[in-house]
Amino acid sequence: MYRYDEFDHTLVAERIATFRRQVGRRLSGDLTEDQFKPLRLKNGLYLQLHAYMLRVNIPYGCLSTRQLRKFADIARRYDRGFGHFTTRQNIQYNWISLAETPDILAELASVEVNTMQSSGNCVRNITADQFAGRARDEVEDPRPWCELIRQWSILHPEFSYLPRKFKIAVSGAPVDRAAVKFHDVGLYLRRNAAGEVGFEVIVGGGQGRLPYVGLTIRDWLAKDDLLSYLEAILRIYNLGGRRDNPQKARIKVQVNALGIDEFRRLVDEEWAQIKASPLLAVPAAEIDRISAYFAPPAWEQITDEAGLLVRQDAASAAFAAWRRANVVAHRQPGYAIVNLSLKATSMAPGDLTADQMDAVADLADRYTLGELRVTHRQNLVFTDVRQKDLLAVWEALDKLDLATPNIGTITDIVACPGLDFCALANARAIPVAQQIGRHFQSAAALQDVGELSINISGCMNACGHHHVGNIGILGVEKNGQEFYQLTLGGSSGADASLGDRLGKGIPAAEVPPAIEAIVGTYKQLRNPGERFLDTYRRIGLEPFREAVYGPDAGRRREVA
Amino acid sequence: MDPAGQMVLANRLTDGRVVFLAAHGGWVDDIAAGALAPDASTGTALLEAARRDEGRNVVVEPDLIKVRQVGGRYEPVAWRDVIRAAGPTVRTDLG
C-alpha cells in the first residue's frame, strides 16, 4: 500500500491546522455559515438530518488493518459505534460534532488517512477495481496510476474551484468492476495494437438527475501523457462548464452539449500547448517509486487446493454456497480473493459496527496479509487468502454476519443512506433494501436467480447508483408519502446502460412483491444460462411491466 | 388531523444535533419541551428569535415546522421532520 512520505504528512498536518482555525472562527462567529460551508465541504464535512456527517477518503478502496482499527476507534469515541462504506469506496460517519472534527482529522492522519477533497467542487476520491493487483484478468494494476492522479489532483491550484464535483475511476481489467463509464473521467488500462499498455480515456459519464454513459475521447493514451491530458480535459471543463446552474454544471452536460467531437477538438487544442510541460511529465522514476508500494506481497509458493475445497464443499452446503458466491479466483496459485458481504439485513447495506471492524481487522492480519479493499458496491474484500484457509475464514465471517452468500446477486443491494440520514433525500432507501433482503433469503433462491444487481437511491442525486442497477429503485415523495419508481436494464460494466423506467411509483410495501414478479418473469422467460440483464435486453420492458402492473395498468392508483 | 401549531427546529452549530426552540428561549433536544406557536404570528415571532440565535452562532438553518398532537405528545407533521425529531427509522436506538 502507498505510505505517506514527509511531504504527505506535512501537507495533511497543515491542512488540519488550517481547518482547526477555520472551525474555531466558525464557532466564534468570525465566519458565517455561508463563508464556512465551502471550507467544511472541502474537508468532507456535511450537515445532515441528525448531525454532521464526515466522509473519509479510502484512496482507490485500499485499506490497511491499522486504518480499519482507527475507523473503529473513531466510531466508538466520536460517533455512535458504526460507519458506512459508500459507493465511492469511502467511509462515512453520521453523528459527528463540528467542534470535535479537527481532533478526528488528526486521529485519522496518525494512520495516513485524510478527508481532503472528499466533498466540494474539486476532484474527489479516485476509485478503482477492488481486485486491483490480484485479478486474473488484469492487464495492469491501476493503483499506481490512481495514486499519481490523487497526488496531481490534491490542492491543484487551478482545479480547486471547479464548476462542480469531479470524479475519476480507473480499471486495469477488461471486466469493468469500477463503473468507469459513469464517471466524469474514466480510464481503462488497455493494450494497443503494438501491445503497449496505455489508457482508453472516457469522458462525460455520470448519474444524478441527468444520467449519461461516458464517451471515448481517446482510444489509447500513452502513460507518459496521462497528467497532461487530464489537465487539458479539466481546463476545458473549468473554462466551459456551466456555473450558472448547479444542476447542469457537471462535465457530462458540457460534453453532450458540445458533442464529443467538438469537446475532443478543444481538449486536443489545449493539450497541444501543455503536453510538453515538464510540470506535467510523468517521470519514470516517480512511477517506479509509487509502483513499488503496490508490488505483490510475499506470497507463498503453493498450489491450488482443488481437492481439499471439493471435500469441504461436500461436507458443508453452506460453505459451498458461500465459496461459490463470494470467492473469486486469484492470480497467484493457492490463493483466493474473498468478498465480505455487508448486506445482512440486520444492518444497513455497507454499514459495519466498530466491533465488526476490529474483528475484520484481526482476521485480515491473520488471513490476508493485513490489507483490505472497499468496493463501490458497499462490500469489503480480503485480497490474499490462502485457499486452505477458506473454511476457517468463512466460519469466522459467518459469526460476524459477514458471510451472506450473495455477492452479485439480488440481495447484494446497494443503497444510499436515504431519508433516514441525508438532508437531500426525498425517501428512505435502507428499509426497502432490508425488506427485499428478507424476502429473498434462501441461498438456493439466490443461486437460482443468479447475477442480478439492485441499486436504491433516496433521491434524484442517485448516490445509490440506481440508474445502473439491473433493477433500479428511486425513492420519490408525493403529498408527504414515499413512493418508489423502478427501472430495469441498467449496467455499470463495460456493457454500460441506463435503466428504463418501468412505470409509476409504488408504495414501499409493494416493492418486494414487485421484485418477486420481475424475478418470476425472468425465470419464466429466460434462455438457459441467461443472466437477468441478458433476458431483459432480449425481451424488453413489456413482460415485466405487465407482471408488476397487470395487463390494465390504468386501473392502478395514480402516483408520481 | 389538523396541526396543533408550529415549532422551530434547527441543528445546533457545535454538534449538528437537532434541537427545538423552547419557551424559555433556549434550545432543547426533546420536542416535548419545544415552544408551540398556535398561530401564524406567534410562529413568525419564534422564527425571528431563532434567526437571532442563528446570528449568534447557536444554531444553523432554523425551520418553522408544523406539529400535531398524537397521544398526548407533539409530533411533526412532515415525514422528514418526524425522522429528524425521532432519529433514523432503521436505528431506533439512535434517536
Image (cartoon, grey):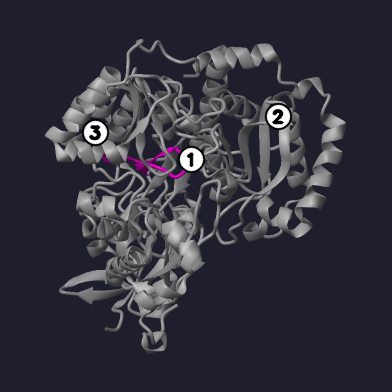
Q: Which label was assigned to residue A177?
A: 1
Which stretch did the figure color magenta? A80-96
Chain at tag 1: A
Image position, residue A43 (x, y; %):
52, 36
Chain at tag 3: A
Image position, residue A344 (x, y; %):
24, 46
Judge from the rendering whether residue A259 lies leftward or rightward of residue A68; answer left or right: right
Residue B45 within the segment the image draws in magenta: no
The residue located at (43%, 76%) in the rendering is: A504
Chain at tag 2: A
Q: Nearer the viewer, mark 2 or mark 1?
A: 1
Question: Which quadrant of the rendered structure holds the C terminus of chain A?
Answer: bottom left
Q: Residue furthest bottom?
A: A555
Crowd class of label 1 (few under 14; some 14 to 19; many from 20; radius 10 Å): many
- Asked if B46 appears above or below A395 in the picture, the reply is below
- 2 or 1: tag closer to the N-terminus: 1
Crowd class of label 3 (few under 14; some 14 to 19; many from 20; radius 10 Å): some
Q: Nearer the viewer, mark 2 or mark 3?
A: 2
The reply to whether residue A403 is in sight is no
Q: Is B51 in front, or is A254? A: A254
SS at badge 2:
helix
Give the residue at mark 3: A356
SS at badge 3:
helix
The kind of residue on which mark 2 rests is Leu
Judge from the rendering whether residue A200 lies leftward or rightward of residue A38; answer left or right: right
- 1 or 3: tag closer to the N-terminus: 1
The kind of residue on which mark 1 rests is Arg
* Residue A10 quadrant: top right
Q: Which label was assigned to residue A226?
A: 2
The reply to whether residue A142 is in sight is yes
- 2 or 3: tag closer to the N-terminus: 2
The answer for how far apart the CA atoms under marks 1 and 3 are is: 25 Å
